[in-house]
Amino acid sequence: MASEIRSMKVRGAGRIARAGAAAMGKFAENYRGRSLEDFRKDLGTAADILLESRPTAVSLRNGVQTCVKDVCGASSLDEAKNSVVQNARLFAESSSKAAEFIAKIGARQVCSGDVLLTHCNSAAALGVIKEANAQGKNIRVYATESRPWRQGLLTVRELSEAGVDVTLIVDSAVRSVMKKTDRVFVGADTVVSNGDLVNKIGTSQLALAADEAGVPFNVCAETYKFSPMTVFGDTVAIEERDCGEIADKELLPEGVKVYNPVFDTTPAKYIDAIITELGIISPGSVYDVMMRQIGDGIFGMRDRL
Ligand code: RI2
C-alpha cells in the first residue's frame, strides 16, 4: 500500500488516509507473531513505512494513528490485534460519513446559477459540487488542469459523469476566470492550528485571485485533515517530487534545474470558510477544534504528546 500511495496510484488526502487505515487493519488481521511486544514493534514499523510514503497530508498520519491508538493499553495480543481491526473499520465508516455531511453542508452555500471554481481533484470539494448540482442548482464549474499530475482531468471526468456543466482551464487562467466566478471550493491536505491551509500547489494563487476579485474562498476538509500537533510546533513538510514529473531531462539544456513542490500554504486571512463535518467554521476556530481533539484523545493525540 505504501508503494501504491508513493506512486500516486492511490491519491487524494481522504483516500490515502482510508487506504492507510485499511492496510493497518489488514496487517493486524494477518499477523502471525505470538507476542504482544513483537506486535507493537512490527506495527510501529508498518506505520512508519506508510507514513513515509507521502509526508504532507496529515490525513494519512491521523488515519494510521487512529488504528493504533489502543494498542499501548491492550493487555493481550488478541486484544491489541482486535483493537486495530476495529479502529480501522470505524475510521472507514466515520470518514465516509464526514464526506457526506460536508457535501450536504457545503451545497447550502451554493446559490442557483452559481459559477464555481475548483482546483486539483478533491473528493470533499467535488462532493459539495455534485450535491449542489443534484439539488438542481443549475451550476457551472471551472476546473484547473493542476499540473504536473493533471488531476483536473479526473475532476472534469467525474463532474461530467455527474451531469455537471464543467470547463477545463490551464492553471494560469485562474485569475482570468475569477472575474466570472461566484465561489471557490477546494480540498485540504492539511489544516494548520492557525487556520492556514496546505493543499495542492497553486491553491494559494487561487486564494489571492479570489481575494482580489472579492470571491468567497471555501475549504472543504474533514477534521481528520486538521493537524493538532501543529499547536505544539510541528511544521508541515512540503513534499517535493521527481523533476521528471515536470519535464523530460533530455528536453532541458544542461545545467537547468527543476523544482517540483507539490503543495503550498494558503494563509488563513485568504480563507472565508472551512466546511467540516462538524459544520462551517472560520480559520480562527481551527485551534479550538484541535484542542478538543487533543482532549478527547482522538487520533491517539495523548500518546503523541
Ligand atoms: P480529498 C490532493 O492531493 C489534492 O491536494 C486535494 O486537494 C487533496 O488531496 C484533498 O483531497 P494529491 O493526493 O481528500 O492529489 O478531498 O497530491 O479527496
Image (cartoon, rainbow, N blue to C red):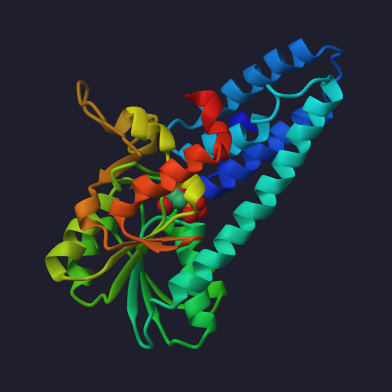
Horizontal and vertical percent position of residue 118: 36, 64
Q: In the picture, which quadrant includes the N terminus?
A: top right
From what the image shows, is residue 142 above or below residue 98? Answer: below
Q: Which residue is drawn at 58% across and 48% down?
A: 15
Residue at the extreme front: 295
Q: Nearer the viewer, residue 155 or 39?
A: 39
Taking the spot 59% from the left edge, 28% from the top edge, the residue there is 50
Q: Is residue 229 above or below residue 117?
A: above
Q: Where is residue 274 in the image (x, y as percent from the top left)?
A: 37, 59
Residue in the picture at 31% in, 35% down: 261
Q: In this view, does 86 lie to the left or right of 68?
A: right
Number of marks: 0
In the drawing, does residue 1 fall left or right of residue 292? right
Horizontal and vertical percent position of residue 300: 57, 32
Q: Which of 267 and 249 is in front in this view?
A: 267
Please state which of residues 122 and 272 is positioned toward the viewer in this rendering: 272
How far across and down, in percent of the image, does residue 104 sit? 52, 73
Q: Can residue 218 be seen in this view?
A: yes
| Residue at image point 69% right, 30% down | 70
Which quadrant holds residue 77? top right
Q: Can residue 150 be seen in this view?
A: no
Please give left or right for residue 225 compared with residue 100 in the image: left
Q: Which of 113 and 254 is in front in this view?
A: 113
